[in-house]
Amino acid sequence: MPDDLKRSKAGGRRILLLLASKLGYQTRSFAEAARRLGFAVVIGSDRCHQLEDPWADGAIPLHFDKPQEAAAQLAAAVRSHQSEMGAILALADRQTATAAQAARLLGLRYNSPESVDNCRSKLRQREVLHKGGLPVPDFFVFPLTEPLDAVLRRVSFPCVVKPLRLAASQGVIRANDSAEFIAAVERIARLLSSPDVQSTREADLDRLLVESYIPGAEVALEGLLDAGCLRVLALFDKPDPLEGPYFEESIYVTPSRLSSQDRQRIIQCAAGSARALGLTEGPLHAEFRVNDRGPWVLEIAPRPIGGLCSRVLRFGPERMFLEDLLIRNAMGIPGADSQREPDAAGVMMIPVPSSGILENVDGLAEALAVPGVSEIQITARLHDFIAAWPEGSSYLGFIFSSGGTPELAEAALRHAHRALRFRIAPRLPVAHPVSGQTLP
């Protein structure tokens, strides 16, 4: 039994259920925020059930690829404490389906399983939004077994090819002609057949989505749903052009510098998308392209912003983090209506320039001394392999800036990034000890 369950029984504390990846950046910050607010925390994670609590957090091991089974297991583990259950939060896409199923079993407020299923597959989301009259790119799906000559007859260029399930733009590639399309499909197919991706046991790893490429500026909206009503917490500009061939994100800056008319259109589009998908409760992260025809929906997800990016947002006179605000909202305690601080703020997800072994990081002191930079966290571990996009899905770390205008916040991030120096060594091929075959 997790230690927080034992303590909650003795002290009468309400419990927050957190569903998170074993490698998720946010788990610790959400758990610490909940305990600061006086709540017990029970974590459900996709770690191996045979390991003896390697992270020493008493997490319940779950298989998120089987959400109904995972939800039943989670509900059984906390059933004797059901009267103390306050809320459930999923911190990333893979956990949302289990959270929806578990919330239904435990009688907790959350999005319906049907609405979450509408978001988990990129294809299903496109179909629902298109049917609801929301602005989405033209799209079709094809199995990897279909001959590419037949697929190409349906393609209009430029287009974007992507997996149906992976997150963080992993495996997303732009193609401008037939040769680039074939190369993109072959590269994504290799990624989907890799042991790391296959081990997730995700559905739809044998199909790809093709979308028309939408030009324009890209923005992200962080919101909070309460009984279907959308409250916008922040609207971020992404000042770096995301034109492909890969779509690794980097800088987010808020408040947005778009016109008030564009901002209002984006908010209306986000609210309409949430309604069409059936989402009603909790955090909402949405991505859009904006051009002279207005906003286009790239992604709607019933979860908070990823990685450590939530640290860029502060709320109320106490300057509480997003984690605190989301927990206050979920648990129904005062402070959830706090507004974001008025100053500009920005975060850079430090891009991976090339795949290889991270050997060293220099220039941290110089980067931290840049005016406006508030924090730098290097999250990639030394001597570990890191993958660049489109195969990659995690960053070298995060740089945060605050104060002044969006222009100053952006400039501080770029200045600090120039001061950092990453030494990445190529990963040497290894010969199989029996066959002698070279392995990657």
Image (cartoon, grey):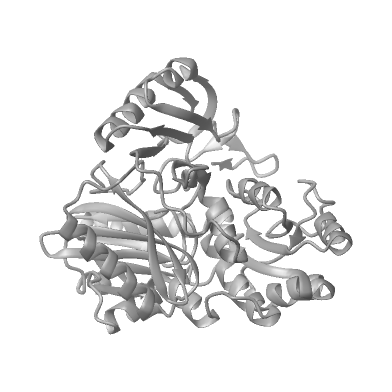
Residue 72 versus residue 244 in the image, above or below: below
x then y, percent, for residue 396: 48, 35
x then y, percent, for residue 217: 21, 51
Query: In the image, is 94 to the left or to the right of 353?
Result: right
Can you name the residue that lies furthest to the left here? Answer: 292
**Which quadrant does the N terminus fall into?**
bottom right
Taking the spot 23% from the left edge, 44% from the top edge, the residue there is 241
Taking the spot 18% from the left edge, 56% from the top edge, the residue there is 260
Is residue 146 visible to the viewer in this orientation of the structure? Answer: no
Residue 178 versus residue 313 in the image, above or below: below
Total numbered circles: 0
x then y, percent, for residue 70: 70, 72
Query: In the image, is 145 to the left or to the right of 19?
Result: left
Residue 112 versus residue 91 in the image, above or below: below
Taking the spot 45% from the left edge, 76% from the top edge, the residue there is 279
Taking the spot 54% from the left edge, 41% from the top edge, the residue there is 440
**Camera-nearest residue between 284 and 335:** 335
x then y, percent, for residue 341: 40, 44
